[in-house]
Image (cartoon, coloured by chain):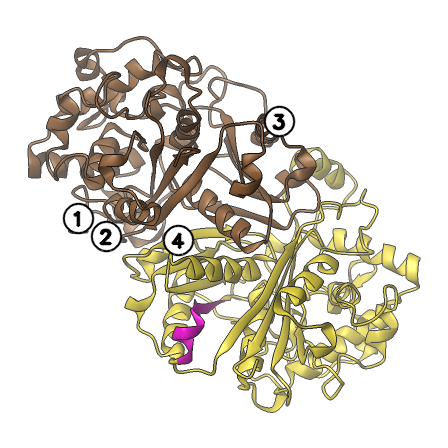
Chain colours: A brown, B yellow
Amino acid sequence: MGRIYGRSASDLAAEAIRLAVTDAGLRMSDVDGLLTSSGVTRGIGMDLAKYANLRGLRLQSDINAFGATAGAMVQYAAMAISTGMAQVVACVFADVPLRGGTAAADAYSSTPARGITGKLRAAAGVSSVAARYALATRRHMIRFGTSSEQLGAVAVAARKWAALNPRAQFRDPITIDDHQSSRWIAEPLHLLDCCLVSNGAIAVIVTSTERARDLAQPLVRLLGWAQAHPGEQNEQGSEFGIRSGAAESGPAALKMAGVVLSEVDVAEIYDCFTFTTLLTLEDYGFCAKGEGGAFVASGALEPGSAIPINTGGGQLSSYYMWGMTPLSEAIMQTRGQTGERQSARHDIVLVSGNGGVLDHHSTLVLGSAAT
Amino acid sequence: MGRIYGRSASDLAAEAIRLAVTDAGLRMSDVDGLLTSSGVTRGIGMDLAKYANLRGLRLQSDINAFGATAGAMVQYAAMAISTGMAQVVACVFADVPLRGGTAAADAYSSTPARGITGKLRAAAGVSSVAARYALATRRHMIRFGTSSEQLGAVAVAARKWAALNPRAQFRDPITIDDHQSSRWIAEPLHLLDCCLVSNGAIAVIVTSTERARDLAQPLVRLLGWAQAHPGEQNEQGSEFGIRSGAAESGPAALKMAGVVLSEVDVAEIYDCFTFTTLLTLEDYGFCAKGEGGAFVASGALEPGSAIPINTGGGQLSSYYMWGMTPLSEAIMQTRGQTGERQSARHDIVLVSGNGGVLDHHSTLVLGSAAT
């Protein structure tokens, strides 16, 4: 992941699958399921099977649920494996928005105006995802007194974690002052409130618990999962900026896993913007509704705090691979393989995915072999 | 479905969902899952939930597996319902390739050249899906002596069934001579070997068997399903044009259903081209490999034959809604609601989906309440 130029998304995705298969102690011929996510700009699709030379698949689809896709793919794979459709499913995301020499892709700066709502938004100048998140953030600020400096604490903590992650794109420390003085992207969101842009690919291999026990890596169990798509998260919605699908998918996934929030050892929260992290933490119940600002400003997200959160530096500092960023870090934490950023306790790991400007949410609960 | 102009795919899809929900005796508020297929040209996507005013969803994704998508969506919905993720899942396809006054959409006439293989194809003039199916068809002709007149029998039979389907776009009878004299699209495929092009939407509601028993329509059970993606179905593949994924997904789905092919009462076969039907019938085992030409020329596909096949007129004569064309007809046959084209026996109904030029296949086995 990162500033990798001159390679297609399919090329990166095929390499990610090969690396993940090898990492698991499997062979490419063991893979009989493939779920792809065509991504934001110029991603991958059904032709990846040929590109990666995967044959005889029993499950294949290209899936899109925006930032909730990674979780949705793993859920789909798990159900297919339980049903007997497939044995070993590769879930892969790849995208190459960055061109050499440019800081960010045009594709991220605006979205096409679709439908009446989209055209009204465009007419009002709300032409980017950042602009829509800015509205959500402003609403939270007005309702609860959340401040830009508090959001800055999310960015500063992410950068501290990224300093411990050799794969992170941005590892130099930043301060609240840096955050405050970074340029506006869409007020009240500064540049340092926004995720970065990355080229790359991540693949996750899902198989049965029985088979995974005999493979090369420590067992990572999928204990629970849920999705929530409230459908009210637009500018007219009563809960827009106040409450997201995480408030439904988090408790549902924990219930399926048979654990409560206080048992969670590590949380990897989807962070396309600092505000997304703050809101999800409230919705999951890490703090009371409206107290997210004070919670993050207390240092709760920094290395050394009670519950390690976004331990890889997240999408704000490490790399932007949609929901695969929190998911891959969660898997490595559950395995106990993240080096100096490793959490001592890592038996129950919570993973969030969020998309469509707070409208689509997935939660996974991972468990170590000890669970 | 058909020549419906001036409405967006989302608009048609939302209406299809409302009609299907009403048909089932449910309310829109009962729907807690939505699987969409963004289609070939200007289809639908994740924003359909807002467009259709669906809220509080627990499952939502946009899915693409080409012509295998309809089956894949129903399989996904069934697994999600079994797992408890959702209770009532709407699976919907919509597309509006037709513009008023034009006979077919440009989008169908050529596909963009992607990757090395795509660019080599383009350089060789193989720039359309029809051209690639033409190669597959030619190979079957050379290997097995299959003739264009035999393919014509598939088209003639489809039109006879379409005459019994008030929703069909083309209902006027055609002859083998009409087929033979219709212009080349990509030799050896005539115009009448090719599916038509339709605007429209189809929605299918999936719920638990327990809940379905109390709803407004006769129970249609999902007895078995499978996918197969051989990954060899390209011009270099040893089985290209000879054998498709149906040869794997058919037996696997029947096995899951606990039935054998001779127990199938009705078959609805994906028919983007006449050749697709012929090859799938061989792969499913309705006739021996290589004998598909003689089988279809025997009148086996015509109304009144032993096993009713493509009873709605299929994509060749009725409407092109990807895998939703055979699926919707199969559901109506299983219910016993297709009027003068209804099969007297309709307890076990086989449904095929095929995409990516014979590279992606799904099979469903439906059962009536009597099964």
Query: Could you classify mark 4 by the number of other residues whose Cα lies within 10 Å: few (under 14), some (14-19), or many (20 or more)?
Result: many
* Dot 1 and dot 4 residues touching (CB under 8 Å): no
Position in image of residue A214 (x %, y %) = 58, 34
Q: Residue B208 colored magenta? A: yes
Q: Which of marks 3 and 1 is in front?
A: 3
Q: Is mark 4 on a helix, strand or loop?
A: strand
Residue at mark 2:
A232
Residue at mark 4:
B60
**For the residues marked 4 and 3, what is the alpha-carbon distance in whole angstroms?**
32 Å
**For the residues marked 1 and 2, what is the alpha-carbon distance in whole angstroms?**
7 Å
Position in image of residue B291 (x %, y %) = 88, 68
Instruction: Report the side of A277 relative to B365 (left or right).
Output: left
**For the residues marked 4 and 2, what is the alpha-carbon distance in whole angstroms?**
14 Å
Chain of the residue that carries numbered disc 2 in the rendered image: A
Q: What element carries label 2?
A: loop
What are the residue bounds of the magenta stretch? B201-213
Q: Can residue B270 be seen in this view?
A: no
Q: What element carries label 1?
A: loop
**For the residues marked 3 and 1, what is the alpha-carbon distance in whole angstroms?**
45 Å
Residue at mark 3:
A22
Q: Which mark is residue A239?
A: 1
